[in-house]
């Protein structure tokens, strides 16, 4: 797995500014798998995408995932910490166990992809978004059907079983109100936060070195990370 350098992070961050989170995930996966066309990555099962992104995070920033969310019951700020190498319930496997398709209520569905999520991302109504997802991943589509809530839930569960890394849910306990809740972990959010922190740090380093030595950005980028860190130590000593 490729390890992101500070310069890699800067390029990724700059390319992803203003993009949707789904597109940022595709950008990062493309860096991790440079020999695969980006349009092909958009058609990967979500579990495969999440696997690659979690491996990229572990290789470049370590296994620990850290973040914050709010309790949906009382609004208390809750800290999230987990081992990114345990997304599948154990050590990250070489490839996720995944079925190519599932049959539910007589209809054949393939597992979800980033492209499917993008098609449903513009829907503000959760039920309409779920229906659009099903229509997108239904194989050999028949006549449109008005799925009820129980059917949507059943199909969603079957698709999750077919692609177990597509969605990771975290059980949270709020110490303020003592309520339990479940949050879906978005590996793109954790990875992109690390990319942005590293990119901003590199720009800060450039500013300090340029101010101290009158070097251009290109000259500073040409330094190895070890030499750049040593010069920063000298500037800040």
Image: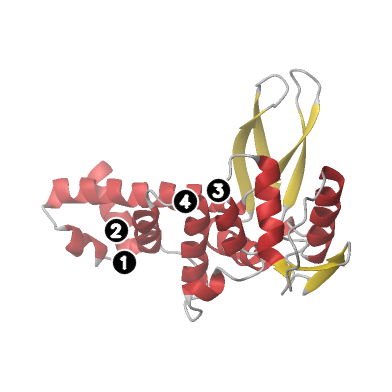
Any mark on residue 20, and which? Answer: 4
Q: Quadrant of the C terminus?
A: top left
- Which residue is the site of mark 2? 228
Which one is closest to the eye, mark 3 or mark 2?
A: 3
Which one is closest to the eye, mark 4 or mark 3?
A: 4
Image quadrant in which you'd find residue 228? bottom left
- Which residue is the site of mark 1? 224
Q: Is residue 31 above or below residue 81?
A: below
Label 4: which secondary element: loop
Which one is closest to the eye, mark 1 or mark 4?
A: 4
Could you classify mark 2 by the number of other residues whose Cα lies within 10 Å: few (under 14), some (14-19), or many (20 or more)?
some
Which x, y percent locates residue 60?
52, 61
Label 1: which secondary element: loop
The answer to whether marks 2 and 1 mark residues whose Cβ atoms lie closer than 8 Å is yes
The foreground one among 153 and 25 is: 153
Q: Residue at point 35% right, 47% down?
A: 200
Q: CA distance from mark 3 to mark 2?
A: 28 Å
Q: CA distance from mark 2 to mark 1?
A: 6 Å
In the image: residue 194, left or right of residue 104: left
Q: Is residue 169 visible?
A: yes
Could you classify mark 1 by the number of other residues whose Cα lies within 10 Å: few (under 14), some (14-19), or many (20 or more)?
few
Q: Is residue 84 visible?
A: no
- Which residue is the site of mark 3? 189
Q: CA distance from mark 3 to mark 1?
A: 28 Å
Q: Residue at point 73% right, 22% down?
A: 73
Which x, y percent locates residue 203?
29, 49
> In terms of sequence position, does the residue under pointer 1 or pointer 4 come before the other?
4
The foreground one among 150 and 2 is: 150
Label 2: which secondary element: helix
Could you classify mark 4 by the number of other residues whose Cα lies within 10 Å: few (under 14), some (14-19), or many (20 or more)?
few
> In terms of sequence position, does the residue under pointer 2 or pointer 4 come before the other?
4
Q: Residue at point 39% right, 63% down?
A: 8
């Amino acid at each position: 797995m490729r390890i992101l350098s500070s310069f890699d992070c800067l390029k990724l961050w700059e390319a992803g500014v203003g993009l949707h989170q789904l597109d940022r995930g595709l950008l990062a996966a493309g860096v991790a798998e440079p020999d695969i066309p980006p349009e092909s990555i958009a058609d990967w099962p979500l579990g495969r995408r999440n696997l690659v992104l979690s491996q990229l995070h572990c290789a470049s920033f370590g296994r620990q995932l850290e973040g914050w969310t709010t309790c949906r019951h009382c609004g208390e700020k809750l800290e999230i910490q987990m081992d990114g190498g345990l997304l599948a319930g154990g050590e990250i496997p070489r490839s996720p166990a995944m079925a190519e398709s599932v049959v539910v209520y007589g209809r054949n569905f393939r597992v979800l992809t980033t492209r499917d999520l993008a098609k449903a991302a513009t829907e503000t109504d959760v039920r309409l978004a779920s229906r659009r997802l099903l229509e997108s991943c239904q194989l050999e589509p028949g006549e449109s059907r008005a799925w009820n809530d129980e059917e949507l839930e059943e199909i969603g569960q079957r698709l999750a079983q077919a692609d177990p890394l597509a969605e990771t849910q975290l059980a949270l306990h709020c110490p303020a109100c003592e309520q339990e809740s479940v949050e879906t972990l978005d590996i793109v959010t954790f990875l992109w936060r690390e990319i942005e922190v590293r990119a901003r740090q590199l720009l800060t380093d450039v500013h300090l070195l340029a101010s101290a030595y009158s070097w251009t950005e290109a000259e500073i980028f040409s330094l190895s990370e070890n030499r750049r860190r040593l010069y920063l130590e000298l500037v800040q000593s």
